[in-house]
Every structure is written in C-alpha cells, then in structure tokens.
Image: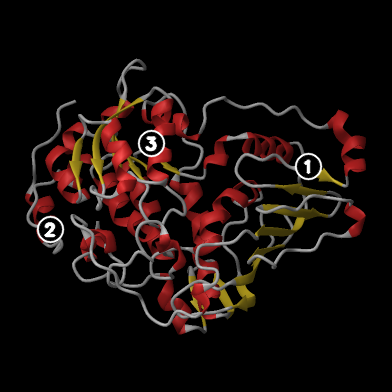
Amino acid sequence: MKRPASHSTRRDFLKRSSAFGAFSILPASMVMGTRSRAATVSPNEKVRLAVIGIGNQGKNDLNNMMGSGHGEVVALCDVDLKGKHTQQIQTKYPKAKRYTDFRKMFDEMADGIDAVLIATPDHAHFCMAMLAMSLGKHVFVEKPLAHTFGQCERLMAMAEKSGVVTQMGNQGHSGANYFQFKAWTEAGIIKDITRIHAYMNKPRRWHGWGATVKEYPTDPMPDGMDWPVWTGPAPEHPFSRRLHPQEWRSWFDYGSGAFGDWGPHILDTAHRFLKLGLPSSVEAIKREGTNDLVFPQASTISFKFPERDGMPACEVTWFDGVSNAPELAEELGDVNLDPPGKVLYGKDLTFQGGSHSSPLQILPRAKFMEMRGSLPRVSGKASNHYANFLLACKGEEEARSPFSVSAPLTQVFNLGVIAQRLGGRIDFDRTTKSIRGNADAQALLDPAPRKGWEEFYKL
C-alpha cells in the first residue's frame, strides 16, 4: 500500500520535540480514520512489526508474538542497545533496523511498519503509542496502559480517531478466566457482586530500601544509553541502577507499583463484565512504610462503585504488602489464598480466583459440587492474546483488550496510585472525571509533561 507524502504539519511537530532534531513524518490528516497495511493484507501475509523496548518483558512479549506465526520483525528500538538485557533479541533478529529513539524510527521507516509492540516502563507508553496511532499503526501496549488518568483519556480518543487495532498486555484477557467470566455472567451465575477483595502479597522490588530512601540515587551513565528518551515526558532524575533496567516500577514518577503491575491481571474481567467503570470514591485505608518517592511497603485501598445497569453498588478492596492479606470467612472452607488473587462476594454465591487466565472457583467446595452439573459450558477461540492482536491487525478477529476496555480499567489503577501516594480519601466525579475538594490529587490526574514533550499531548 503506497503511503502519502510528508507534510509540513508533521515536520513542524517533531521539530518542536526538543529531545531530537527535525523529522519528516506522515500527516495525521491523511491517515486518521484509515487502517494501516496490516488490516488489508491477505491471511497468508505477515504483519510488519516494530518493537519498542526489547529487553526483559519486551523480549518475552516478542517471543510470544512471533510464536504465533503471524508477524515479522522489521525494527527494534531500545534506549540501551548495548545493555546485556537487549542482546538476545538483537541477535535473534539481525536484519531488523535498530534505533534508540522511537521518533527517528517512525521518521525513517513509517512506510514499512504495520504494528508496534510497546514494552517500555509505564511512564513512556503514552508518547510512543500516541505517535504510532497518529501514523495509522496498530499498537500492542504493555500494562498498565499509561502512567496517568489524563494520558488514558487521550489514548482512548486517539484510538477511536485513528481506527487502528489496539491491545493492552493483560494476557489473561484472552484466556480461560475471560471466557468463563463472560459465560457465567451472561448465564446469571456471577451476579449481584457487592464486594471484591484483590490481593498481591509477594515481595516487591522496593520492599526494604524503599521505606527509607530520601532522594534519587546516581550511578555512572552506561555507554550508549539514551537517558533523555528513557525519561520521556516524566520528571527528570539522574541515571541510576535503581531505575534502569526494571527497577523503575518502585518510583511514583515512573511506575505504578504492585497495583498497576498486577491489577490488570487480577481485576480485568471483573471490571469488564461487572461494568464497574470508574469509582465514586477511593480511600487509602492502610499505608505502611510510606515515602514521598517510592511506593508504600504495604497498602490497602478501597474503591466504591455505585449501582449501574441494574447491578448493585460494589466495593473493591486492594491489598498489597507481604503481611497484608484479606481474611476469608470460615464458612467458605479451607481455601488456598496464595497471592496473587481475588475473592468475589455476591448475595448468593462467593467466587475465588487467581490472576491471568486462572478460572474462578465457587466457594465453599460443597456448593460447587452441588451446582457443577448446571454450570454453563465455557468455550472460546483458541488464539492467545498475542495471536489475537496480530489476527485483529489482519481483520480476522477483534482485539479482546482494546483501549476502549483497557483504558478505563487502567484509570482505576491511576486513581488508586494517587491514593497510595497522598493517603486519605478521594471523591471522584464520574461525570466530569475530576476529583472534588483535593487540589493535590486533582493535579496528579493529568500532570504537565516535561518540557519538550508537550506536542504528544496535542496530537
């Protein structure tokens, strides 16, 4: 498919992006509302894939995506191409073009890319996904979708405007739990849920040192590291091994803590099929080992969701921290609550499950044995989350976790992180999508980007 020519609007946009120089990028006016090449290729052709973030989680994502047989890697982008964690993928795909700056990648080879896999730290997702979608590229973005509530709003709007395929990397949303929750909800087995306890009580990276840190540490910059691009729109701090690679999740400025990390794998189906939407209030019931820079050592966060579509009001309570787990009523029997997981309390039935694809169980077991013959048969397509995305790019399936689904889910985590950070109660107006009576919390809904990155917020 022939691509349109460059346009001054796009050139001006990237000239104003101070972290790089002048680019020539395809005009949004020519691609908005259209599909990229991947939506029109025949089933026996492969989706041309660019990958941003090729170490650790990105490596796992790419290996799984390529295992589907539906893609070919044409570009690799990472701020640390000399890092040990990026070598395996570079060796595996020697013909793919390499970049440290995603903007340069799109400028030089936008015509040759159909879809983009984004597996960078949380704070960096937004700009990459916005630019990719504005150029008509399908996007698979790791969870949580974005670092702030406002970024999620813009991603939803751009996804709708561009018409591209979108998918968040909550992989269980294409697994057994997804199909079971859908079938049991439609059959009326899961109904009248009034309480949900979700928990992640395994040790996290910041446990221990995070309670006492008073400033960002500094380490020598690795050779070849593109730190300005790594920092992106977030506040700038010195390079440190406490930030890169992988350690960024510990810090409020860059990560989303245990809640943003595991919430998408634990609460995704409940949020979707119970139509929870956005909460009316969020309250930090417990915070231990608090710090202005790093996530708490333990926290309990309560979310109140009002009645909706004939469903009763529901309170969702999140527990993290090694010794901060919910208690289970004795009448529910001897149940293994090893983290991560969830318990759903209905007026008639109680359900317990884990994370990702783990299916639900009815508690107590005697109740399940009584009902098992009448439970609906669960069936679903066999494609996994990665194959589902690529097949959706080719028009053969619908993506199961598009931004219209995953962005509101992520916004729940964005609000929870604000409560973890500030403490206290947040009263949220679901209509205006604003926080009432708390200027500090309101400011964290949509903080201004670092200078030089404002244009991505205007796309």
The secondary structure type at the circle numbered 3 is helix
Q: Amino acid at mark 1?
A: Gln
Along the viewing direction, whichever of 343 and 428 lies nearer the viewer = 343
The percent position of residue 139, horizontal first and vertical second, equals: 35, 42
Q: Give the farthest residue toward the top.
A: 44
Identify the residue at image location x=72%, y=58%.
196
| Residue at which label 1 appears | 361
Q: Amino acid at mark 2?
A: Phe
Q: Amino acid at mark 3?
A: Leu
Query: Quarter of the image containing the C terminus?
Result: bottom left
Tell me if I can see residue 114 in this picture. Answer: no
The percent position of residue 9, horizontal first and vertical second, equals: 11, 53
| Residue at which label 3 appears | 62
Q: Is residue 220 left or right of residue 355?
A: left
Judge whether 14 appears above or below 450 on screen.
Answer: above
Q: Answer with mark 2 or mark 3, whichever residue precedes in sequence.
A: 2
